[in-house]
Image (cartoon, grey):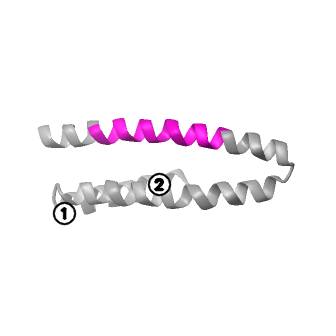
Amino acid sequence: GDSMQASMSSYLELSMIFFDEQQQHFKDRIQKLLNDNNPLQALREISSTQLPLWKSVRREFLSGLSSIGPKVAKDTVKEHLVRKKKRG
């Protein structure tokens, strides 16, 4: 219903802002990678900063799902995992 639409709308808007910021950050890091000529160190550095951010986003998203009801949230997460497994 309406509350779910508002939540998803807000989530998508914030996700796009976050994505844009992360893309710029990533581009800056790639530029540094090319300048430093040490690709493995740069990739390690990028992943060490990106992983906690994405874990935070996932945690916030899942906590939002729990507000619509544990059964619905659990089913939604299960469906996501099944789709992910099918994609390989």
- Residue in the image at 25% along x and 54% along y: 64
In the displayed structure image, the side of residue 30 where residue 80 appears, left or right: left
Amino acid under disc 1: Lys
55 or 88: which is nearer to us? 55
49 or 11: which is nearer to us? 49
In the displayed structure image, the side of residue 63 where residue 69 appears, left or right: left
In the rendered view, would you say 13 is above or below 68? above
- Residue in the image at 42% along x and 59% along y: 56
Q: Main secondary structure of the magenta part?
A: helix
The mark found on residue 84 in the picture is 2
The residue singled out by tag 1 in the image is 71
Q: CA distance from mark 1 to mark 2?
A: 20 Å
Q: Quadrant of residue 10?
A: top left
The mark found on residue 50 in the picture is none
Amino acid under disc 2: Lys
What segment carries the magenta color? 10-27
59 or 42: which is nearer to us? 42
Tell me, yes or no, if residue 85 can be seen here.
no
- Residue in the image at 18% along x and 43% along y: 4
Q: Quadrant of residue 9?
A: top left
